[in-house]
Image (cartoon, grey):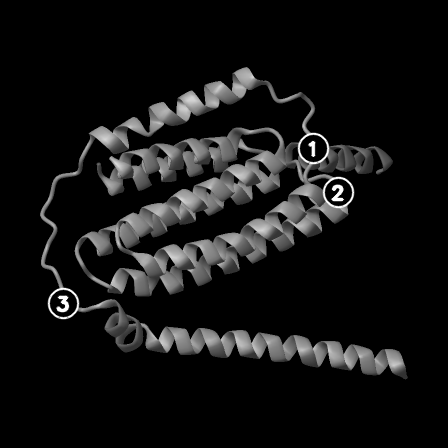
Amino acid sequence: MDFVILSLVMLAIGIYGLLTNRQLLKVFISVELIATAATLNFVMLASSMGVGLGQAFLILAFSTDTAVSGVILALLVIVSKKYGTSDMGKIIQMLKDKGESEDEVQ
Amino acid sequence: MIFEILAVGLIISAVLALFLDEVIYAVAALSATFFFTALIYLANNAIFAAVFQIAVGVGTLAILFLSGEMLGDKPTKEASPKRTGALIGAGAVLSLPAIFLSVSGSTGTTSNLDFGDALWNVRGLDVVLQAIVILTVALGIAIVLYEKRKKGGQ
């Protein structure tokens, strides 16, 4: 059993989700998974070495993670209010259609 | 043995959180991920980390449930048990490297620094600074709301 590999697998799953999902909420979940993987690696390594410092650094990691979550959620709310959907594919299509109609007017 | 079970649960719940179509189910799976992470911390005597993980996880999940229900798009296709089973199987397969592989290397020198010393002697400044930042933000929000109320009254 190796926590480095466990957190590496978690990181890989998170990055894959970040690259393939188009729902903004799923992107948020991917970011959470990546943050969890990083924290897991850090805490378990420190804990297995008997150093309390790893847990102390956890405070900083969680604060950063929470701040990132807040920013992503704020973006999600703004985008959903503006476009009526949180699907990035649909938003990009809407923007393309809007650009084409503006070109036709000109 | 307990670590292996927790690792399998962690990876399966992470895979389900990402690939379930229904947002609410995905958030429920993410809550399982946080729970398994906290259990892994607990099993490795990192009690503070486990408690903090649960505390932060509960807050994040509450907001995620609300925003998922309000802002998430409804899935176009129905969730099938076959797909869920396939996702669980994929998660179990993905957790195999963590169980059977190992990164060899020396653990380095162990330190006698315990958690209390580490927190207050090394990270004490961080904790105080974060408290100041949170207090400043709270005061700012209070002042903005007060000014808004004052303008509304006039």
Instruction: Please state which of residues B7 and A56 is positioned toward the viewer in this rendering.
Output: B7
B57 relative to B154, above or below: above
Residue flagged by tag 1: what amino acid is it?
A: Lys
> Which residue is labeled 2 in the image?
A83
> Which residue is labeled 1 in the image?
A90
Q: Chain of mark 1?
A: A
Q: CA distance from mark 3 to mark 1?
A: 55 Å
Q: CA distance from mark 2 to mark 1?
A: 9 Å
Residue flagged by tag 3: what amino acid is it?
A: Asn
Q: Are marks 3 and 1 in contact (CB under 8 Å)?
A: no
Residue flagged by tag 2: what amino acid is it?
A: Tyr
> As drawn, is A53 to the left or to the right of B147?
left
Label 1 neighbour load within 10 Å: few <14, some 14-19, many 20+: some
Label 2 neighbour load within 10 Å: few <14, some 14-19, many 20+: few
> As drawn, is B86 to the left or to the right of B80?
left
Which residue: 72% across, 34% down? A96
B9 relative to A74, above or below: above
Disc number for residue B34: none
Front of the two marks 3 and 1: 3
- Residue A35 position within the rendered picture, expressed as x and y whole percent measured from the top left: 42, 49
Quadrant of the frame with the N terminus of chain A: top left
Front of the two marks 3 and 2: 3
| Figure quadrant of residue B135 | bottom right
Q: CA distance from mark 3 to mark 2?
A: 55 Å
> Which residue is labeled 3 in the image?
B112
